Image (cartoon, rainbow, N blue to C red):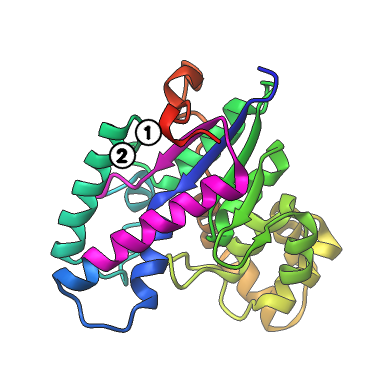
Amino acid sequence: MKNTKLLAIDGMGMLHRIYQANPAPEGREKAEGAIATMQMSFRRALREHRPSHCLMVFDAGGQTWRHKLYPPYKANRQPMAAELREELAKYKATLLEEGWAVVEHPGHEADDTLGSVAFTASGLAVEVVVLASDKDIASVGQLGARVYDHFDHRWHDDAWCRNKFGVGLARLQDWLALVGDASDGVPGVDTVGAKTATRLLLEHGDLPGVLAAAAEMSGKVGEKLREQADMARLSRQLTALRMDLFPAGLELATMQVPVAYRH
């Protein structure tokens, strides 16, 4: 698979960021504008990364395995505006007509699909670039994929992770499990903030190490870690990515960039 470069795009994340950046009231015009901007962003990504293969990934919508595990998960998220949902459906249809590979896995999130892409490709001679700005997905960098924030023009690699969170990619999900993630409804542990989580992980290695050491910790942090150990473990499950959504392999032949868009 020499010279094979797969660009895997978090389509829902891209659309959400574009839509939220526009202060205009919800309505058809805003929805159409978001899709038009997304099309331009997609074309720019193709020019910048020049992939031989491309996969556009979306959320399937509805409840996921994380909701079953923790019903309040993402409970604070507003549903997608009806107009945007309709325009997105049209855009997906257009992508398919043009020959692009589009995938969504019911019961899972786009992050799970992207994690599974990175994991499945890790045993192949395939360069994988994941286009996503969500901090959660950066952890797939451990699998050999490279994660790029299309909007901030920045690689979310191990150096970026250490600079932003104080820990490397291997401990990012543990860090999120301790701190929590309000945007996703991941509870974390009360009183454990960003600096405390970083210190604990640097001192004790990983989340199990932190929870084991909590038995000897004094003060409020030690108390909360002991009281909420199960919540920390649950939060760690919520921050994990599925890696098994392509049991038959990636079927790269179906992901080739359409001839009209090859550089």
Taking the image as drawn, is residue 240 in sight? no
Residue 42 part of the magenta-drawn span = yes
Q: Residue at x 73, y 78 (%)?
A: 195
Position of the C terminus, as image quadrant, is: top right
Q: Which residue is tagged 1? A: 100
Q: Which of marks 2 and 1 is nearer the N terminus?
A: 2
SS of the residue under disc 2: helix
Q: The magenta stretch spans which residues?
A: 32-61
Residue at 45% in and 36% down: 261
Residue at x 38% of width, y 49% of height: 69
Q: Is 196 situated above or below 127? A: below
Please give the residue where the numbered disc 2 appears in the rendered image.
Answer: 95
Tell me if mark 2 has few (under 14), some (14-19) or many (20+) residues whose alpha carbon lies within 10 angstroms of its own.
Answer: some
Disc 2 versus disc 1: distance between alpha carbons? 5 Å
Residue 180 versus residue 23 in the image, above or below? above
**Vertical placement of residue 182 versus 114, above or below:** below
Whether residues under marks 2 and 1 lie with C-beta atoms below 8 angstroms apart, the answer is yes
Q: Could you say where residue 97 lies in the image, as x and y percent from the top left?
A: 25, 32
Residue in the foreground of this view, choosing between 88 and 172: 88
Q: In the rendered image, which quarter is residue 1 located in? A: top right
Question: Could you say where residue 249 lies in the image, as x and y percent from the top left?
Answer: 51, 18
